Image: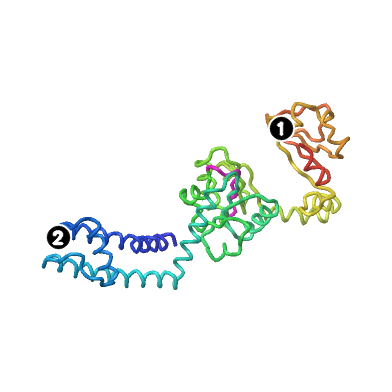
Amino acid sequence: MRNYLGLARHRLLIITLLPALLLSVGTCGLRAIEGWPWFDALYMTVITLTTIGFGEVHPLSTGGRAFTMVLALGGVFSIFYSTAEVIRAYATGELKQLWERRRMSKQLDALNNHVIVCGFGRVGRLVANEFFHAGVPFVVIDRDENELRDLGDMGVALVGDATSDETLKHAGITRARAFVAALSSDADNLFITMSARLLNEKIPIVARADEETAARKLERAGANKVVLPYHLGGTRVAQAVLRPAVLDFIEVATRRGHLELQIEELILREGSALANKSIEETHLHDELGIIVVVVKKRDGQTLYNPRRDVRLIPGDTLVMLGPREKLDRAES
């Protein structure tokens, strides 16, 4: 597809440059053969190429007439060729594809702090849908253009091979906030995880795996988190039998549309209103009714059900439980 569109772009470029080339050749030729002023030579070239037939500006020599005949034939040929190419490009959809590709390139260049999702299969579609409803900008890379049509306006669709470094760079791998490897093949996910890590050492990478052996390889290749969909699904089925109330609570707290109670995480930045205070001093529970469930310290230590005197510093991550409206106000 990329080569096809490249050829189409070259053909349209020729159509654009051909008239300019003929004008230059005709003007310079008449100037050299007849010795006319530049403007007279240009005027004669224009009326010759457009076959208007206003007549000669100055009397032409035999050489000038021969040159003018060749120029006129070139003008007629260029008009027919250009017209035929424009009609063909419109009929075959090349113009539309070039326009869509140009629009997509502008969208990609404008993206920053976005998420790159590789693969638009069953898992990739669910991931994209979650990002769309969360208001997170994202790019989906897939080889199948027909599959990507289902993406619509939810995100930016990039037709290409996710295992190619060029494609990942085009998707803005150096400006992205996170990378998701959701292809159906563990081998492909392993390869693109390694590529993404080499292109951006700091980007968080989440990868999908079908086998536990592949999960270990993905972690060694640079994935920060590996998700096994079948293993996760099986675990939830078992929990629905063994601990149904616990599972119901987790589903309610993580459901996007449930406003009364949700679980959210918050990374404390420099200048945050919660930074450099103890949990008690933040008044999260007393004023907002928010429960701090977990504090993941900047040094990697994880505190479950932390004490109220635990001091929060920039770089810490809080996992909080509370109403959606209050969670949104937590750092304000």
Q: Judge by depth and name the residue closer to the eye, 288 or 239.
A: 288
Residue 201 percent location from the top left of the image: 54, 38
Residue 24 percent location from the top left of the image: 25, 58
Q: Provide the residue designation for mark 1.
A: 316
Q: Earlier in the sequence, mark 2 or mark 1?
A: 2
Q: Amino acid at mark 1?
A: Asp
> In the displayed structure, does residue 228 sit left or right of residue 170?
right
Whether the magenta-drawn stretch holds residue 177 is answered as yes
Specify how the rendered protein is coloured.
rainbow
Quadrant of res 265: top right
Per the image, label 1 sits on a secondary structure element best described as loop
How busy is the neighbourhood of tag 2: few (under 14 within 10 Å), some, or many (20 plus)?
some
In contact (CB < 8 Å): disc 2 and disc 1: no
Residues in magenta? 174-182
Q: Judge by depth and name the residue closer to the eye, 294 or 231.
A: 294
> In the displayed structure, does residue 76 sit left or right of residue 192?
left
Tag shown at residue 34:
2
Whether the magenta-drawn stretch holds residue 67 is answered as no
How busy is the neighbourhood of tag 1: few (under 14 within 10 Å), some, or many (20 plus)?
many
Relative height, residue 277 to residue 131 (above, below): above
Residue 264 percent location from the top left of the image: 76, 43
Q: Amino acid at mark 2?
A: Glu
Image quadrant for the C terminus? top right
Q: Judge by depth and name the residue closer to the eye, 124 or 21.
A: 21
> In the displayed structure, does residue 269 sit left or right of residue 327?
left
Image quadrant for the N terminus? bottom left
Q: Residue at x 32, y 70 (%)?
A: 79
